[in-house]
Image: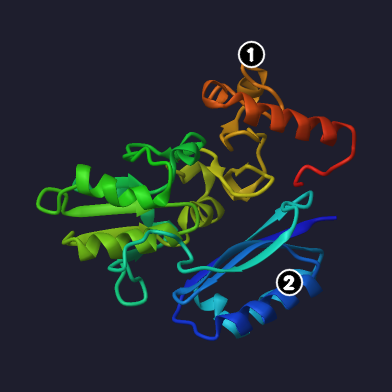
Amino acid sequence: MTWTVAALYRFVALDDLAALQAEARGACEAAGGCGSLLIAPEGVNGTIAAPGDAMAGLVDVLDRLFGVRQGELKFSTAAEKPFARLKVRLKREIITMRAPEADPTKRAGTYVEPGDWNALLDDPDIVLVDTRNAYETMVGTFEGAIDPNIQTFTDFKDFVAAELDPARHRKIAMYCTGGIRCEKASAFMLAKGFEEVFHLKGGILRYLEEVPAEESRWNGDCYVFDARVAVGHGLAETKWDRCFGCGAPLTLDGTSHADYEKGVSCHHCKNGLSQERAAAFRMRQSQIDAGRIGTSD
């Protein structure tokens, strides 16, 4: 069975969140869906999957509830079920930054369509910034981009304060997986006095979908938050794996490394893993190997 995967978000003022949550969860369950959907006063964000043709009806419901077709909505496919379960949660923010001044519903940077992105990168005055976390940038990036080497998106504020200056860095271009972090980051930077802030509309995923591989400036693959681990041009599935212990993406070299232990750790995290936590991971993996629990339990 082929699964349709929908990555979506929209910044829009919402109220009566509990009612929206209940109806959205009901629609996802009726479609046999899995994945994660976050609902907050500032909008909706998530990646969900549904089998066969069920996604069309599910998107119709989500569009009625949240207007998702007016936001970012991208589709891809997965050969196997990409998420273990369904989560529909209420949150304070659909992408956590803890910066009230970063409000994309009031002000955001300039959207750049994927077809226009390469031309923007050719501007010698552009400072290109990757807004993703360090484990994501390991998989792929645009050449010449600044990697902030952050562990969570909330750390982006500290990176801006330490490394960027609105008086010197007058033209900023940013990108992320699907576009949502850049919208919030651009709103934050405008509030901090940066004059020209651009961001890739639809993020890396839309760029890889729309820009031909022979014209692409993207190096590597794009980390995604599901069982596929990463996708390439045309959003095709790739051959990355993921460490259970720390979540780091791993190539064949990574899973062949002497420090790799399936379901426990890899060379990125082995030295920092406590004996107690490693023992718990080994117990979990032994139960999986014996067929007593699933990979998501």
Residue sitting at the far top: 258
Q: Is residue 176 above or below residue 245?
A: below
Instruction: Return the x and y of residue 117 as percentages of the image width and height.
Output: 37, 54
Report if residue 118 is visible in the image. Answer: no
For image coordinates 21% across by 43% down, the residue present is 162
Residue sitting at the far left: 167
The tag on residue 177 is none
The residue pinned by badge 2 equals 28
- The earlier-in-sequence mark between 1 and 2 is 2
Q: Amino acid at mark 1?
A: Ala
Please state if 139 lies on the left or on the right of 146 as rendered.
right
Instruction: Return the x and y of residue 118 as percentages of the image width and height.
Output: 36, 50
Colour mapping used in the image: rainbow
1 and 2 marks in contact (CB < 8 Å): no
Front-lying residue, 40 or 231: 40
Q: How far is the residue under mark 1 from the one under mark 2?
A: 42 Å
- Dot 1 crowding, Cα within 10 Å, few <14, some 14–19, many 20+: few
Report if residue 58 is visible in the image. Answer: yes
Instruction: Return the x and y of residue 38 as percentages of the image width and height.
Output: 57, 67
Instruction: Return the x and y of residue 202 as percentages of the image width and height.
Output: 47, 61
Image quarter for residue 21? bottom right
Image quarter for residue 77? bottom right
For image coordinates 74% across by 28% down, the residue present is 282
User: Quarter holding the N terminus?
Assistant: bottom right
Q: Secondary structure at mark 2?
A: helix
Q: Is residue 66 above or below residue 54?
A: below
- Dot 2 crowding, Cα within 10 Å, few <14, some 14–19, many 20+: many
For image coordinates 62% across by 20% down, the residue present is 253
The tag on residue 258 is 1
